[in-house]
Amino acid sequence: MSTVTTPPALSRLPRRRIAPNALVYVALFAISFIIVVPLLWMLLTSFKTDFDAITSPASPWPNPFTIEAYVTLATGDLPILRWFANSLIAATAQTAIILVTASAAAYALARLEFRGKKIVFGAIVATLLVPGVIFLIPNYLIVDSFGWLDSLWAIIVPGSAGAFGVFFLRQFFISLPAEIEEAARVDGAGDVRIFWQIILPLSRPALATLAVLSFLTNWNDFIWPIYVLLSPENLTLQPGLSVLQGTYSTHFGIVMAGAVIASVPVLILFTLAQKQIVESVASSGVKG
Amino acid sequence: MADSSLVTSLRGGSRLRGAAVRPGQRRPVHNRRTLTAYLFLAPFLVIFSIFVLFPAVYGLWISLHVWNPLLDDHPFVGLQNFFDLFTPGSLTFDDFWESMGATGIFVVASVPFLLAVPLAIAVLLNRRIKGGTVFRGIFFAPYVLGVAVVSVLWRYLLDPQLGAVNAVLGLLGLPSDTPWTVDVPWAWISLVGITVWWTLGLNTVILLAGLKGINPDLYEAASLDGAGAWRKFTSVTLPGLRPVMTFVVTVTLLSSANMFGQSFLITQGGPGTETRTAIMYIANQGLVQNQMGAATAMSYVLFAILAVVSVLNFRLQRDNTK
């Protein structure tokens, strides 16, 4: 992978550059250490006994190694498996809604000329800059009026109205050459066919990236679910962790096991889609 | 607008096609396409209107009332909720501005580190090294975790009595009784440090992309002029990064100003209410204390201040460019 980013100029690199680079590697390994150790500590602590977690805080190695914390979580009063399922359902459903609604809207904004286009696009983009707290209380009342308080609908629907997906896909759709579409129009294809059979297949990488980013955002959301989800069995994992910390305050092995359970899906997703995630984020600043 | 274009399209646009339209101006097609476009937009616009546009206005309406969701009657009070926020001695004045002060402290303390640390790392990653993408991936990894995961993890590691950080410091012969999460300034240091640890990968990858966009010829020209590493950094790297930097500074300022989860979970706003941020106070006032009118008024004041700060930041950076 690294060979891709290494410029061809590497071969004519003067030898004396190697010494400063050694210092660069030392610095990069030191930062990696600071990033990784707390995560490993979390993982290892989750395999400690309750007693071990409290009595030997300076040693991350479980002694003995046990899955007791996970068993306690799975069989205890707090329905963490239910939370996991709730998180999975909510994040998946919201991602699906975003992909459908945002790609259709982005197609109109990127490839069609129509009256009011500037106003619609302007309204969507303007909301990108509005802090979320503005919507917190009004949306709480709106969700309540739909009877969605304490239900997954509250976690799925309002968040799928975000402007980001439309903005992101529009940028990508606009970059596709006009010719591909014109050829199809000459063959008599309508907008629906062009959207479905040409634009969407060509945009698979962008759609995949948006899917991953949407899933992560929903999975990790905290402030909204802690206020709209009320009963213990209806929580998602993030507010669940808050309850877990309150319930098992110093039973750190159990709390860390909960944190591991909430981390594993997103870390797997990140490992699989690292390139797409990092590159979409990286380009946000250059384009913006 | 949708209605009229619907009618036109149902008529096949014949009326307009027959009209004296200037050559090359294909209005019928245009109208039919307007209908098509709004059909494509409709699903998004429906949820966008209900959960983004409407609440932005509804919030202003709420802020003009004493709004307790448990009561049927929401007395209209005009701008009283806003006046209260600017009247010393009112019910909300002290607490609100204390929380705004806490947010201010966090912004001032965190933003420099959230810019400097990622910039330094990006400069390192921009060198011709092997494994750059692997390091980049490692540095970015914490950012994909939720604030709840990051917070319960560090709440444990930094526990003054039972946490790993103090225990390890003790083994190294350093003070092992630092009250990381329960006293100031330690609580602020912890909150800033955790936030840097969690999000440094974000700004790093954005700044790295900016660095890669700088023309290498500029560095060569600077070398020929005898510029050293530091001189190159200040006269080529920093000016070259300016457009990206404006974006990064703005986004970082706004996200630090919206800090909530770390304080909520790690310090619970303590000691006392010293690390209770504005978002934490607003959410609590509105959704726990049921003071929704006052809380929405606060959210708009916060928004207005952030808008002013963002515009000032933009102008400042633009003037620097001249």
Image (cartoon, coloured by chain):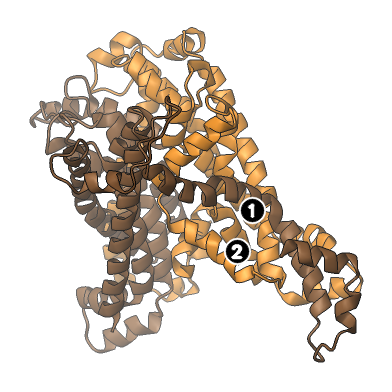
Chain colours: A orange, B brown
Who's the residue at 66% across and 43% down the image?
A: A97
Who's the residue at 67% across and 58% down the image?
A: A105
- Are the numbered discs 2 and 1 placed on the same chain, yes or no? no
**In this figure, which residue is indicated by the disc labeled 1?**
B45
Q: Chain of mark 1?
A: B
Residue A24 visible to an observer of this rendering = no
Left or right of residue B172, residue B35 in this image: right
**In this figure, which residue is indicated by the disc labeled 2?**
A120
x%, y% of residue B137?
45, 49
Residue type at the position of mark 1: Leu
**Quarter of the figure with the C terminus of chain B:** bottom left
Q: Secondary structure at mark 2?
A: helix
Residue type at the position of mark 2: Val
- When the figure is inspected, residue B47 is found, relative to residue B313, above or below; the finding is above
Q: How many neighbours does mark 1 have within 10 angstroms: few (below 14), some (14-19), or many (20 or more)?
A: many
Left or right of residue A269, residue B134 in this image: left
Quadrant of the rendered image containing residue B316 = bottom left
CA distance for labels 2 and 1: 9 Å
Who's the residue at 46% across and 60% down the image?
A: A282
